[in-house]
Image (cartoon, rainbow, N blue to C red):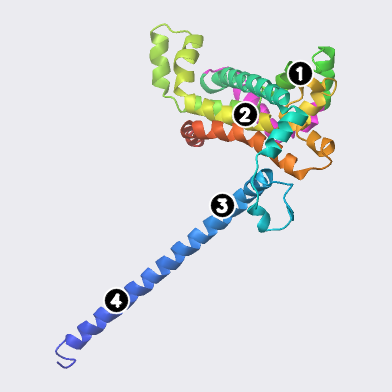
Amino acid sequence: MNERGGFPTTLHARAEAAGLRRRAAWRKGVGFALTYLILLAILAFAVFPFLWTLAISLTDKKAAGISIYDLPRSLFPPAVTLGNFVEVFEKLKLGKYLLNSLIITGLTVAGTLIVSALAAYPLARLRFPGKNLIFAAILSTLVLPTETSFIVNVLTLNKLHLLGTYWGVVLPTVATAFGIFLMRQAYLAIPGTLLEAARIDGASETQILWRIMIPLSRPSLTALGIFTLVSTWNAYFWPSVALLTNEELLPLSVAILKLKGQFNYDTFNVAAGAVLMMIPVLLVFLLAQRLFMRGLEGAVKG
């Protein structure tokens, strides 16, 4: 049929539409592939240090021709062993330092949650003069590095005879601006009508805090607990200063550096010690991942 009959024009339009769909599908496929490539590159960049450390810690250093700098071969150890972990525990007695880390981290997490929960409540739900000014002053400390206050903390703890004790490590770190901010945002997300109903029923502010606010802000408390656990577990500077006079109480993060001197820069043992440090934090995060994500969502929405 000729052009006036309409078929050539219709066929041309259909072919053009099919071509547009193919080009759109091709562009979508390319965009999808690029997105995956970028995400995989970021994933590799993020997990590569951990995988390399894990591979080194599992490598049998007595095997011939072993070199940790021979990439990518060092990522796939030809001889796997757990001897590096056993050696670290036997020679350095890491069990003692592991117990110290558990005590210091447990006290710090508990103290941070209690202080943050108590301090955030009046800033979120009570009215008093200067509330916003106090909150702004607390937030302003977020920009200050913690190392700037260590001289004052050392002098204060020395006066209190707390240097070289667990409490000397814990007490200066339990009041954090981030924790107070996170819990304030969680309290603000709780409906005010619920609090008013509790007050009408005769509940005191303490009862409202412990029976309403804290149970409803459990995800934020979990997120704050995990943040505190990770930072405390990996802390090096402050514990090494506060426990300078009592090395028996040093946490694992500080004791790991002793591997460098005791085993004459044995990188296999250092890697084994680093992996041992990561395992408790990873386990806690995996077990509380759901509450952790809900806590962060609540903080962002608040």
User: Is 83 on the left or on the right of 36, as rendered?
Assistant: right
Along the line of sight, which residue is nearer the eye, 57 or 212? 57
Question: What type is the residue that disc 4 sits on?
Answer: Ala
Name the residue tied to disc 4: 18
Of 117 and 141, the residue lying toward us: 117
2 and 1 marks in contact (CB < 8 Å):
no
The quarter of the rendered structure image containing the N terminus is bottom left
Residue that appears at 81% across and 17% down: 163
The three-letter amino acid code for the residue at tag 3 is Leu
Which-is-in-front pick, marks 3 and 1?
A: 3
Q: Is residue 233 left or right of residue 213?
A: right
> Cα distance, mark 3 to mark 1?
39 Å
- What range of the chain is rendered magenta? 126-150
Q: Give the residue drawn at x 62%, y 48%.
A: 51
Q: Please name the predominant secondary structure of the magenta segment in the image.
A: helix
Element on which disc 1 rests:
helix
- Judging by the rendered image, the residue that carries numbered circle 2 is 229
Q: What secondary structure is marked by label 4?
A: helix
Query: Is residue 273 part of the magenta span, yes or no?
Result: no
Question: Eyeballing the image, is 224 above or below 126?
Answer: below
Q: Residue drawn at (60%, 31%), measured in percent from left and top?
A: 280
Dot 3 or dot 1: first in sequence order is 3
Q: Mark 1 or mark 4, which is nearer the start of the sequence? A: 4
What residue sits right under mark 3 in the picture? 43
Residue 209 in percent (x, y) is at 49, 15
- The residue drawn where x is 65% and y is 19% is 107
Q: Quadrant of residue 237?
A: top right
Q: Is residue 149 part of the magenta span, yes or no?
A: yes
